[in-house]
Every structure is written in structure tokens, then in C-alpha cells.
Amino acid sequence: MQESQNIEFKESWRDEYLRWICGFANAQGGTIYIGIEDNGHVCGVNNAHRLLEDIPNKIVNTLGIVADVNLLNKEGKDYIEIIVSPSNVPISYQGIYFYRSGATKQELKGTALQQFILKKMGRSWDDIPCEGSTINDIDPKAIKYFLKKAIDAQRMPIETFEDNAETVLENLNLFDNEGKLKNAALLLFGKNPAKFFVGAEFKIGRFGKKESDLMFQDVVEGNIIQMADSVIEILKSKYLISPIHYEGLQRIEPLEFPEDAFREAIFNAIIHKQYAGVPIQMKIYDNSVWLWNNGDLPEGFTIETLLGKHTSKPRNGNIANVFYKAGFIESWGRGIDKIRDGFNAFGFPEPEIKTEFGGVSIVIQRKQNLDSQTLFKMRSQIQAMILEMMERNPLVTQQSIANELGVSRRYVAKIIEELKEKELIKRIGASRYGGKWQVIKKN
């Protein structure tokens, strides 16, 4: 025998080993051997028969569980075997919860403890009631948006479009047994989810060559049922290239990525996020896009599991159900395949998926290496926005421009100097207060 995730060797008994037993019970179970050295050599115990009585009693009295304690002998040396079965309820040692992970004993705290207890109770975080919320916190426009999408996807009957918000939420099982709104209801359809959940945001940043070189950024807030639309809209206007072409008289501006596959990646991040954690993050670089959501993979899952055939195990079952009814996702865990197939079909490298920083990330390579001409086009988009703001309000300040665009004042000042050098604008009057902008040329 060797020590492993489910086997632990101890030379002699100490009461602190009740913590290990607690960790095994909260995980997948395991076995502790008393009287065996770390290398697997049996050193034996001198008081085996007394331990055979004391250990079961201490386990019952301290942890409230029953373990199978056996006396074994090898080469004339007695040693104790303690077999711990996995518990279907949370087990604590003196009010502290331990969990066996790999070959280590971990103390569960904060969000990890909350998620563990909910899981043991057979519930998810999005399923518990949101205290202090009422039906007035629900946005009827978000409900109508969802109904339209669900009806178009033929996953809800057309007559449901006339249902009020309360009926829709009831049909989606977003009230608990006491009539309180669940967390999922406020996240999906809330007027202001940030009022209840600090991490219900989607952060987007444009970076230069270095991680510290943040050029500009945006934070998408509001309900998550419409979040993907808001993210895509911002990306098209400011972050990604939209190659323009015409079909007849219609102007077409597709995203530089295959949009269905790209949306699927965004949906995955929104659905599987651990909302008690930090916001979703998307970092745009010259040659890639990094998308990350807080929250580990489901228990027993690895990256290899995700890339192979697997069942669907959403962290937030209620949210996943609503996204499915809206036609945003398919069931049966096909999201990763849809992302990979979508990018491959358009000649993109397969996105890289990995676990890092307590969450899951996906790195998407941009098809074109952003040469100087492409970078010039992206910078021109920012310049055009500033020109439009100056033409609309000649008294606009650099700080106001920075606030509206979500960039630093220093970056705005740099762009304005470029516009002056190109003789596209000029300053009339005072350089700061009392002066105004004059747009000479828009193109």
C-alpha cells in the first residue's frame, strides 16, 4: 500500500486526526491506518485494544458519524484500520469543516464553505432565496426580452408572451417554497442585480503589449439574460474588428470571429460563473482574446473531460435552464464542442481551455496578426468617437470623454494631441476652463 487521496498513514494515534476523518467524510471517503510509517512499513501500536474502543467513541461523539474501526496484524505487529464512508451531510470538527483534496486536508472557509454546504444539501447557489428582494426588483423589459427569444426558439408557446413577470418566474421555478425570489431570478431579470450581488459584472479591457498597458476598459452591468448582447455590442463598437461588406444595398458588419461560437463562449462564462466571486473578465490583446470566469470545474471533471464526451453539470441549474429555454444554449454538455467546431469551421486555431486563478479560461487566437494598418483602424475608431463627442458638445472636458469611453484621461489627452497634429480639431479660448473645441474635419 501507498498513501494516496483515499489512504493516510499515521505512526500513532492523536486526537487531531479526527480532522482527517472529518475531511474524508466530507469528500469521497477514505482509510486511515494507525501504526504505519509514511513509507508503508508497519511499526505497530502498543495500545491497540484500548484504541479499538476509544477511537470509535471519539469519532461518534466529536463528528457524529460511525466509522468502521478494525484491528489488523502483520508480522506480529498490531495496527488499526479506520474506514471512513463519504457523508451525505456536512460534517464539522469543533465547528470547522475539513475536506480531503488530493493528499491534503483543507479547511473550508468563505465561498468554498458556502458552495460545499449547498452541494451537500443538494442545492446550488442560484437556487437559494434572495433576502430583501421583491417582485418590484424584476425588470418587465427583461422578461419580455426572454419571452421573445424563447418563443422564437420554439421552446415556449406564443401565448406566454402576454404573461406577467410573476407568472413567468413561477413557471420557471424561480420562487422558493415560501414565495421568495431565488438568486437566479434577480441575476437573470433584475433591474439592478449589483444591488444584491457585487460580482454580477462583465469586465472588458483592451491591453497593449504588456499586461500593465491597459488602454481602455468597460464594465457591463445589469441582468445576465441580456448581458451577452451588451458585451457583443461593445466589442463591435470599440474592441474588435468588424469587416464591412455589402449584400445588395444592405451594409453588413460581422464580428471578426464566428459570432455563434464566440457567443457560446460568453454564454458558458455567464452560466458557469461562481457569482459569489469576482466578475467575469475579458482581456483583448493584439493577437488573442482571454475570457475567464470565476469557479472551478465540476467535481471529477478535468480539461480532458470537457474536451471529450461528457454530461452537462451546470454550476447554476436555474440559470442554465432559462438560457436553454431562451435558445441561447443546447443541453447535454455540447457547449465546448460548439465553440471548437465553430472556430475550426472558419479556419481559426482551436481555442485553448484551461483552469487558472480559481476559474476557467478560454484563449481565442485572432485570425489576423494585427499589423500596423489594422491597429491604425482600431485607433481611428476611438478618434472618431472623440470627434463626434466634441462636435456634439464643444465644451466637453477630457475627463468627461474618458468617463464615457471608459478610458484613462491620460489616454484621451494623447489622442487629442494626435487629432490636433492632424489638424482635425483646434482649441478656441482657454486650454482648460472657458475654452471650447472646434472640429475642423470629421474624416
Image (cartoon, rainbow, N blue to C red):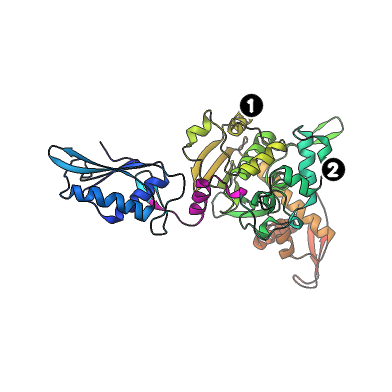
Quarter of the image with the N terminus is top left
Q: Is residue 191 left or right of residue 39?
A: right
Q: How crowded is mark 2: few (under 14 residues within 10 Å), some or many (20 or more)?
A: few
Q: Which mark is residue 392?
A: none
Q: Decide: is 403 above or below 232.
A: below
Tell me the residue that label 1 is attached to.
345
Tell me the residue that label 2 is attached to.
162
Q: What residue type is labelled 1?
A: Ala
Q: Residues within 10 Å of mark 1 (few under 14, many from 20)?
A: few
Q: Position of residue 240 (x, y in %)?
A: 68, 43
Q: Where is residue 154 in the image (x, y as percent from the top left)?
A: 77, 32
Q: Position of residue 21 (x, y in %)?
A: 34, 48
Q: Is residue 112 magenta?
A: yes
Q: Give the range drawn in magenta.
A: 106-127
Q: Which of 360 and 92 is in front in this view?
A: 92
Residue plotted at (20% across, 51% down): 50
Q: Nearer the viewer, residue 181 or 358?
A: 181
Q: What residue type is labelled 2?
A: Glu
